Image (spheres, rainbow, N blue to C red):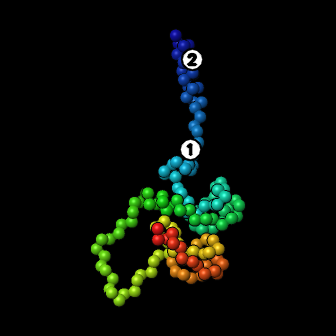
């Protein structure tokens, strides 16, 4: 009877000690708590992406803006809190300039050559110097 208890003890000890812990995934598309990068590589290189504009360390291409970053922020924080007691502007007051990007991260004026970025006014592209064109999707 004593040997049966010893054998049972060793069997249990071995079975618990041999459990292998699987590594946890770091980033999955279906994981709502995963961090979405603001700028991503167009080639979807592994371990690339950043919270600031730059270049992919793997393929050296310039990062592109990831609109899903703003969607994640919207889903987490909800719509912007807009005050309801705003006074109407005076009749002769100039209209306030629109922001460079809307809530979806779309620029009001963009480069016709497809350079990254844009502006809130019709100026020139910071990358190539071409005049920026009005982007109608900014208003949608």
Residue 7: mark in rendering: 2
**Quarter of the view holding residue 4:** top right
**Quarter of the view holding residue 88:** bottom left
Residue positioned 54% across, 18% down in the render:
8
Residue positioned 62% across, 75% down in the render:
112
Where residue 44 sits: x, y (%)? 64, 56
Secondary structure beneath label 1:
loop
Where residue 22 sits: x, y (%)? 58, 39
> Dot 1, how many residues are within 10 Å of its Cα: few (below 14), some (14-19), or many (20+)?
few
3D distance between C-alphas at marks 2 and 1:
34 Å
Q: Is residue 51 left or right of residue 113?
A: left
**Contact, CB < 8 Å: mark 2 with mark 1?**
no
**Quarter of the view holding residue 91:** bottom left
> Dot 2, how many residues are within 10 Å of its Cα: few (below 14), some (14-19), or many (20+)?
few
Relative to 59, is 5 above or below? Answer: above
In the rendered image, which residue does mark 1 sit on? Answer: 24
């Amino acid at each position: 009877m004593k040997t049966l208890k010893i054998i049972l003890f060793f069997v249990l000890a071995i079975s618990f000690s041999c459990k292998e812990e699987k590594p946890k995934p770091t980033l999955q598309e279906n994981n709502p708590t995963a961090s979405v990068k603001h700028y991503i590589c167009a080639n979807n290189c592994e371990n690339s992406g950043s919270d600031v504009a730059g270049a992919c360390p793997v393929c050296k291409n310039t990062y592109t803006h990831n609109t899903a970053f703003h969607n994640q922020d919207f889903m987490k924080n909800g719509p912007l809190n807009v005050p309801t007691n705003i006074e109407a502007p005076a009749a002769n007051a100039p209209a306030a300039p629109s922001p460079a990007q809307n809530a979806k991260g779309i620029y009001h004026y963009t480069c016709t050559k497809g350079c990254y970025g844009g502006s809130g006014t019709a100026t020139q592209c910071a990358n190539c110097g071409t005049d920026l064109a009005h982007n109608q999707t900014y208003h949608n």
